[in-house]
Image (spheres, rainbow, N blue to C red):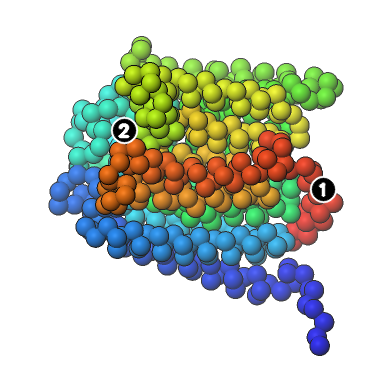
Amino acid sequence: MDAPDTTPVATRPWRVMLPLLLAAAAIEATLARLTKLMSLQEFFPGKEGISLDFVKMLGPDWMRNTWLQVTAFAVMFAAFGAALWVFHRARPSRAMLAALFLPPVVWSVTAASMYPPYAVDLFHNLADSRLLWIYRLNPMIVAPAARPFIIGISYADQTSSYGPLWYLLTFPAAVFQPHNFLSSIIILKLWMAAFYIASGVVIYLTLRLTRPHLALAGAALYLWNPFVLMRDLGDGHNDVVMFFFVLLALYFATKNEWLAVAPALMLSALIKYVSIPLGPLVLVYVLTMPSEQRRQVLPRLLAGSGIALVMTAVISIPFLAGPRTLSALAGETRLSITSTPLLVQLLLTGPFLHDSSGDISRMLMRALFLIPYGLLLASVRPPATRLYATSYQALWLFILLATAWFRPWYLLWVVTMGALLPSGWFLAVTLAISFFGMFPDITEQYRNNVPWLAVDLMRLYAAPVVVAFIPPALIWMAALLNTRTWLFASEPPDTAKSAVAAAAVD
């Protein structure tokens, strides 16, 4: 009987590259198929001249469309899982880096021609870009409907609730092809795809500093993730741009480049304000350092905060127009859709407290979030992996508890942070969030076709919330009960193994 084969995987490149090649080809074939079925070239601007969704593009057969998407996602996740397993076992090398980054570049090009299937924010972003860069109007106070656009888009009479830096960063969409709307959309998608690739690079570099043996796996958990592919590349959400700067801030913190941490985090907040709760976590992290280290780091962090304030003023002042500047953001905080606070309103505060507007449920759930957030602030301290873990938990609990206006792509915040924690319970929760985050849109669109749901209003509202939150929340609860710590782990990273992996890079 032959002895078991114990040759390290790094010495047999074909055993690594072949499954990765097959996995990448499966993802590409599926992504290309979805792009062909929902292509910009076919449906934009379209006969109706309005923004569409996957329901209108795929046709009236809801059962067929559901199985089409479920099958596509199953194939992509199976390929992703196989690739992730390989990246977890493989050693870093130039060949592995090529295998890690080249397929995402191909997928970015493929998905650039996909009509956004699950959200039409991309068209609103293009219209905002044109307002600023072509018409010289302030998109924070002027809605897209103020100027002509090639199609009718949802919420065209409302301004976006983004920060001023986002509008500045949209310049490629309006500047390079101002008279060709189709090309402008593709350019905007490719521009955001560049941030997607850059985020993968930052994840890899950050893990090289903390857990080198997981650097490939962590970057793959983000770059090869079908949830990220469909939301970042397919729909073209600007969350990828916002979170790139969060990753950059964490990279600088891990590398002890503290002068750059606050500016990077502020750039993120100037795109989308959701990253603001991460700021106190970073500050407490520094304050809990050993006294000698804190005396060195704190002045640099404070100096960086001063730079961040100057940057904020320079970027924001041209957009300031009194209270109207943040009216869209303020309006969104008073809305509820597909969220835990909405269910609380329907089940509790509505019947018992006559909360018809949802104000009470939103206030209660935001107050409830402050309890675990305070516990997270009390638990954050060095090393850097604790900062990643508490940031992950803060974002997840913010979405689960305090976000009244929830859309599935918000889960990108947690999934991206999870790439810095690519093992153990965090990996399990991140994979669950990724997989089940694919289905709320399908559930939301087709729930009326399911009799058991259609006969009860509460079931209709609850269905997409349950699909998005319950499975990952159960795994999250199991992790918390099993480990009894926010960190989901009782042992530090294997530094010896990390050192060996670092030395193995070709």
Residue 13, horizontal then vertical, whole percent: 68, 72
* Residue 258 shown left or right of residue 129 in the figure: right
Amino acid type at circle 1 is: Thr
The quadrant of the rendering that contains the C terminus is bottom right
Q: Mark 1: few, some, or many residues within 10 Å (few <14, many ≥20)?
A: few
Viewer-side residue, 370 vs 196: 370
Looking at the image, residue 454 lies above or below residue 397: below
Residue 110: which quarter of the image?
bottom left
Viewer-side residue, 177 vs 45: 45
Amino acid type at circle 2 is: Asp
Identify the mark nearer the N-term, 2 or 1: 2
Residue 443, horizontal then vertical, whole percent: 35, 49
Residue 232 in view = no
Q: Residue at x 82, y 82 (%)?
A: 3
Looking at the image, residue 288 lies above or below residue 392: above
Residue 254: which quarter of the image?
top right
Q: Residue at x 36, y 29 (%)?
A: 346
User: Among all residues in the image, which is located at the extreme top?
Assistant: 322
For numbered disc 1, what is the local secondary structure?
helix
User: Among all residues in the image, which is located at the extreme bottom?
Assistant: 1
Residue receiving disc 1: 495
The span from disc 2 to disc 1 (Cα, nearest Å) is: 48 Å
* Residue 495 shown left or right of residue 62 in the figure: right
Viewer-side residue, 128 vs 28: 28
The quadrant of the rendering that contains the N terminus is bottom right
Res 128 label:
2
Residue 309 in view = yes
Residue 169, horizontal then vertical, whole percent: 42, 35
